[in-house]
Image (cartoon, rainbow, N blue to C red):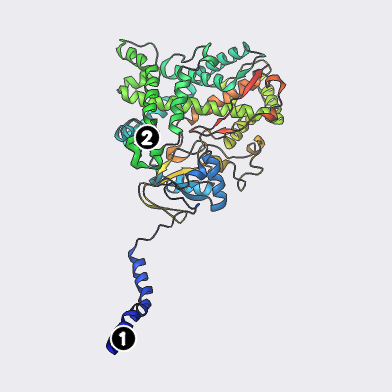
């Protein structure tokens, strides 16, 4: 080999080594050119494709609360390709619901929705994606005719009548085992039925036995909305409806609409109407059948399920906590008398009853997560970057059990609310079972009266025991996750 050839070879092999000194400069330039990862809230490392689905699959409210203890009060997780930000403390909830309320009041419409987004935006009070004029009109309309102090007061006789019928039914079943959730569901449905249509939706014989009628339809409709949906995790597959959830939802949606479609038809054709219920008001206000159907589906499904679950949880907690039960019974006897029927005018005289309801809502909020919101644009929460189209959850279940906020957080102690100004009207972010600010549950005033009246009547008119003399401390308190947080195993009790 010639000397020239040897030199050329040396230059060929030594050139890359000398080039190494430029690599740090190239990397620095490349780093500036590539978009930076946003400063996301901390969270567990996601798996490829799956994200964190397997970590939170079965009981998301519990799993996310546990992750918050590790990563902080505001965390981010990946559900498939969807980024989800979860608030699990009063401060992080306030950032979403108060500080950024105007921006983050945008709803995330569930993929099981059978209507086009434009229809939902125009006619839905729950899932309208933004605070449009249509949404503001519906909120104002429902408040005026259903949920204002004047409207709620005008419904008093109706609620008292249905509770009286419930007490009459339970007296006919004294000494027998009853499923309390079924009786509560029927009672609430009849109250709503009379409020909306001037008629009962469940007859006496159906209080417990009707498993194929309206109760099953409503519960299946709500259940489908809470089922894990591949389309939520991977929006690319939305149009395919791989699990058939949208198809099933449409079936139960139609069954639900059929319950009142004939009533609507009759009222539209009537020359004059003797009643003046909510359906009459909607028809007289020019609502189309589509507007009526969507609004009634939301009001009936939400109102019946949440109220029922709250009363069932309250009964379970009171049976397990004899001290609280005895205090409530003593208050009722002292303020009402042993034989008198409870009226809504009595409710304000019963502070321990109110404390029992609040403590139930703290431990068992009607919805474990507030209805998800969506970030319409990139924003900041607690100094973290929240990318556009992220979904936002507020874990009300975790907030109510936060040991940094609540002393002896896992115990049922109504006394904690007796000398406290904390209330569930959306101003105290450590206690927001109905949400807060613009998106607070519009039916709160009605639900408050209904829950207090029913619970007080159950405790005042009956002693309660478990079947076969079972120990109340053995009541199964496992939760069934869904849009509403129900008992996994229904509470069976004996009225005495």
- Which residue lies at the image location 47% right of the left edge and 26% below the top edge? 303
The percent coordinates of residue 390 (x first, y second) are: 40, 47
- Give the quarter of the image for residue 364: top right
- Front label number (1 vs 2): 1
Q: Is residue 444 above or below residue 97?
A: above
What secondary structure is found at the residue carrying circle 1? helix
Check disc 2 and report its element: helix, strand or loop. Answer: loop
Relative vertical location of residue 309 with respect to residue 57 in this rendering, above or below: above
339 on left or right of 18 = right
Relative image position of residue 314 (x, y in whole percent): 61, 29
Residue occupied by mark 2 = 242
Disc 1 to disc 2, C-alpha distance = 67 Å
Residue nearer the viewer, 133 or 200: 200
Which of pointers 1 and 2 lies earlier in the amino acid sequence? 1
127, 481: nearer the viewer: 481
Q: Quadrant of the N terminus?
A: bottom left
């Amino acid at each position: 080999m010639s000397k020239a050839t040897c030199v050329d070879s040396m230059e060929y092999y030594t050139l890359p080594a000398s080039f190494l000194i430029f690599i740090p400069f190239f990397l620095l330039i490349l780093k500036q050119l590539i978009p930076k990862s946003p400063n996301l809230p901390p969270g567990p490392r996601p798996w490829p494709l799956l994200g964190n689905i397997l970590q939170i699959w079965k009981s998301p409210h519990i799993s996310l609360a546990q992750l918050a203890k590790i990563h902080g009060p505001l965390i981010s997780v990946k559900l498939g390709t969807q980024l989800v930000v979860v608030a699990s403390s009063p401060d992080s909830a306030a950032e979403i619901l108060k500080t950024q309320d105007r921006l983050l009041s945008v709803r995330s419409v569930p993929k099981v929705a059978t209507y086009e987004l434009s229809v939902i935006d125009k006619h839905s009070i729950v899932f309208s994606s933004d605070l449009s004029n249509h949404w503001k009109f519906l909120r104002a309309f429902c408040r005026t005719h259903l949920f204002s102090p004047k409207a709620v007061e005008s419904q008093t006789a109706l609620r008292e009548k249905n509770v009286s019928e419930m007490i009459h039914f339970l007296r006919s079943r004294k000494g027998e085992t009853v499923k309390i959730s079924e009786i509560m569901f029927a009672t609430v449905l009849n109250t709503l039925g009379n409020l909306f249509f001037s008629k009962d939706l469940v007859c006496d014989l159906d209080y417990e036995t009707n498993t194929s009628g309206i109760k099953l339809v409503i519960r299946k409709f709500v259940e489908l909305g809470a089922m894990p949906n591949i389309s939520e995790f991977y929006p690319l597959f939305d149009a395919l409806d791989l699990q058939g959830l949208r198809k099933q939802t449409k079936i139960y949606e139609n069954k639900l609409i059929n319950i009142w479609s004939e009533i609507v038809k009759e009222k539209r054709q009537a020359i004059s109407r003797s009643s003046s219920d909510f359906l009459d008001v909607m028809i007289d206000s020019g609502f189309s059948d589509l507007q009526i159907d969507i609004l009634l589906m939301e009001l009936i499904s939400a109102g019946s399920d949440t109220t029922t679950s709250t009363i069932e949880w309250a009964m379970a907690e009171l049976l397990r906590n004899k001290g609280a039960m005895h205090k409530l019974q003593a208050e009722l006897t002292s303020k009402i008398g042993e034989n008198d029927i409870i009226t809504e005018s009595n409710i304000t005289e019963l502070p321990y009853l109110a404390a029992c309801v609040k403590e139930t809502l703290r431990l068992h909020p009607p919805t474990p997560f507030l209805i998800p919101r969506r970030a319409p644009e990139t924003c900041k929460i607690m100094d973290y970057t929240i990318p556009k189209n992220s979904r936002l959850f507020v874990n009300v279940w975790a907030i109510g059990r936060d040991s940094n906020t609540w002393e002896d957080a896992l115990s049922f102690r109504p006394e904690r609310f007796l000398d406290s100004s904390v209330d569930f009207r959306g101003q105290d972010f450590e206690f927001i079972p109905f949400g807060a600010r613009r998106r607070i549950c519009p039916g709160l005033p009605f639900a408050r009266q209904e829950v207090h009246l029913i619970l007080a009547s159950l405790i005042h008119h009956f002693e309660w025991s478990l079947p076969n003399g079972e120990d109340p401390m053995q009541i199964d308190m496992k939760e069934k996750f869904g849009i509403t947080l129900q008992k996994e195993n229904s509470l069976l009790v004996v009225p005495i």
